[in-house]
């Protein structure tokens, strides 16, 4: 029994013990969708983070998605080659690249995300409406808390 548990109360598993297997299962479910769209996990993360408004630096994008800034260059090259993103020099500082989605990049991102979330809906359907809303609210709060830390 943990220090905070009352007699007869079960210990809860550590958060990582619960979240890691769930994360692995979700990533495995995403893989066929991403493969069908010719995307890697990192490419999908880039597309999710970009929109029409440009991000000023590749380093800022890498930090925002938790990627190594040197590793992200190949991902950006591949996305630019497929014309899914714009990567243009900043007129104010030609050493800096402005990054944004192309219309085709938005279409690919939205199509892949819809398919991924459709799969997630099957998993979430096992929860009551109240539990589902609470789970999503808590997950958003925990995700935000890790960004602040």
Image (tube, helix red, strand yellow):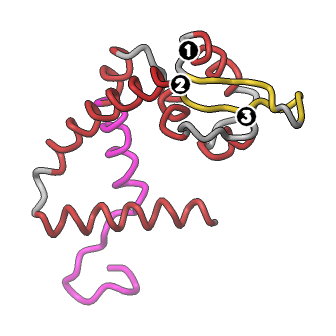
Residue 48 versus residue 1: which sits nearer the camera? 48
* Magenta residue span: 1-29
Residue at x-position 10% and y-position 52%: 126
The answer to whether marks 2 and 3 mark residues whose Cβ atoms lie closer than 8 Å is no
Residue farthest along the top direction in this orientation: 81
The residue that disc 2 covers is 102
Q: Earlier in the sequence, mark 1 or mark 2?
A: 1
The mark nearer the N terminus, 1 or 3, is 3
- Classed neighbour count for the residue bearing mark 3: other residues with Cα under 10 Å, few (<14), some (14–19), many (≥20): some
Residue depicted at x 37% and y 52%:
19
Residue assigned mark 1: 83
Q: CA distance from mark 1 to mark 3?
A: 17 Å
Per the image, label 3 sits on a secondary structure element best described as helix
Q: CA distance from mark 1 to mark 2?
A: 7 Å
| Residue 139 among magenta residues | no
Question: Percent from the top left, x then y, of residue 79?
Answer: 57, 18
């Amino acid at each position: 029994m943990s220090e905070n548990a009352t007699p007869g109360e079960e210990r809860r598993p550590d958060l990582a013990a619960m979240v890691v297997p769930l994360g692995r299962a979700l990533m495995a479910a995403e893989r066929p969708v991403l493969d069908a769209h010719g995307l890697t996990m990192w490419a999908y993360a880039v597309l999710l983070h970009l929109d029409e408004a440009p991000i000023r630096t590749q380093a800022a994008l890498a930090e925002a998605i938790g990627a190594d800034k040197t590793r992200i260059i190949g991902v950006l090259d591949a996305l630019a080659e497929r014309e899914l993103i714009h990567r243009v020099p900043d007129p104010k500082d030609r050493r800096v690249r402005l990054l944004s989605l192309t219309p085709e990049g938005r279409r690919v991102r939205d199509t892949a995300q819809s398919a991924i979330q459709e799969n997630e809906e099957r998993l979430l359907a096992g929860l009551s409406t109240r539990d589902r809303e609470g789970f999503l609210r808590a997950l958003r709060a925990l995700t935000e808390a890790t960004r602040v830390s």
